[in-house]
Image (cartoon, rainbow, N blue to C red):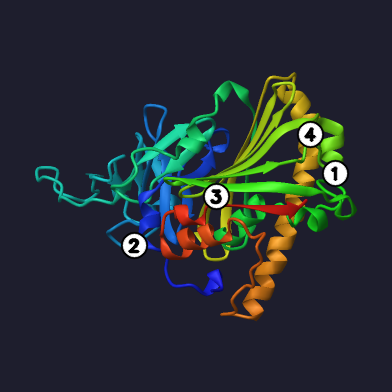
Amino acid sequence: MNPSTAPAWPAALYQHWYAIARLDRLRRKPLAITLLDRHFVIAPDQHGGWFALEDRCPHRQLALSAGCLRDGQLQCPYHGWRFDSHGRLSALPGHDPQQPLPPIRVPAFPLQAHDGLLWLRPSSSGAPRPPALALELPTAQRRFVWQAQWRGHVLEVMENFLDALHTHYVHAGWLRRDGQRRPTEVELQVAGDRVRVDYRGQPAQSGLVWQLFESARSGESAHFQLPGSTRLQYDYRNGARACVSLHFSPVDARHTRILATFHISGRWAPRWAVRALLWPLLAHVGRQDAAILAAQQDNMDRFPGRRPARMHGDVLRPLLEDWWLHGRAPDPAHARELTLWL
């Protein structure tokens, strides 16, 4: 199925947490956020935190994100109706002050902040916290945070990040070289809502990034946890570890928000050095992926309803389709071992 022409998002997706913003980029004013085709406004409260409401005043349907903050409450720009952090009507200009306010509310949604990111659950009930994959890395090891919005269905954007086979062409010379492939043993494991893919037999990578910044690897693995958290983890023989984590939040069927963190342990890598030396190369790789995904989306729009072909190396595609198109958790039956030439 072409994901861009698929039916509405499965209900199960709304029960989970999604990274929606960098904390260091938030300002003390309302911000409109679209997630899974639903519209929210996030705003700062009076205690240094944030709250999230549906981005709609129930009076005349104006976007609350177009309003302003008054005493830590959101004020509608049309008639000045004001709502507190729980969505309760707290001020009604023109109303008889001797009478109680009507019990009007705007739906409110939970937020959590962690490791430089703000997370939203687009439902009043569901998972109690963001995915463990996003919570288990020590914050002291984080070297930078990055945010972008790419054109493409979340299924395609996530697969791009987790897929090793495109790197010889889209990132030719930067990550891998087609003429220097070698057999690599691949093992896919499924445990609950988490998926892990281990790559063995590739202590070195053939691209420029490895040659400039890496040493001999002892392991390489790709991780995925519902709903949209991923990690590429590189373990080195000297005991060091590097983790590139991307958290994907669908805006709509053709646009995906990405929040990324980069953690390093066991080696000298101050933030300024990572940003000055490594980040320009990683940013270039990101622009290459964004361009190929936009071109993919353009052509999928030209051929709606066409099903993609599969090959045995599309290791994670079936699980990603199960989740994003049908709301089904990873099936342990997908666990397998195979050999890829990387």
Residue that mark 3 sits on: 248
Q: Is residue 155 left or right of residue 289?
A: left
Q: Cα distance, mark 3 to mark 2?
A: 29 Å
Q: Cα distance, mark 1 to mark 4?
A: 14 Å
Q: Is residue 330 visible?
A: no
Q: Amino acid at mark 3?
A: Phe
Name the residue: 69% across, 64% down: 294
Between disc 2 and disc 1, the foreground one is: 1
Name the residue: 61% across, 61% down: 156
Residue that mark 1 sits on: 207
Q: Is residue 240 above or below residue 259?
A: above
Name the residue: 86% across, 33% down: 212
Between disc 2 and disc 4, the foreground one is: 4
Name the residue: 68% across, 43% down: 199
Residue 61's disc is 2
Q: Amino acid at mark 1?
A: Gly
Percent coordinates x, y for residue 265 in the rendering: 66, 22
Percent coordinates x, y for residue 169 in the rendering: 82, 58
Q: Amino acid at mark 2?
A: Gln
Q: Is residue 39 above or below residue 264?
A: below
Q: Quadrant of the N terminus?
A: bottom right
Q: Are marks 2 and 1 in contact (CB under 8 Å)?
A: no
Q: Is residue 2 left or right of residue 39?
A: right
Label 1: state its secondary structure: loop
Q: Are marks 1 and 3 in contact (CB under 8 Å)?
A: no
Q: Is residue 192 above or below residue 330?
A: above
Of callouts 2 and 1, the N-terminal one: 2
Percent coordinates x, y for residue 46 in the rendering: 37, 29
Of callouts 1 and 3, the N-terminal one: 1
Residue 306's disc is none
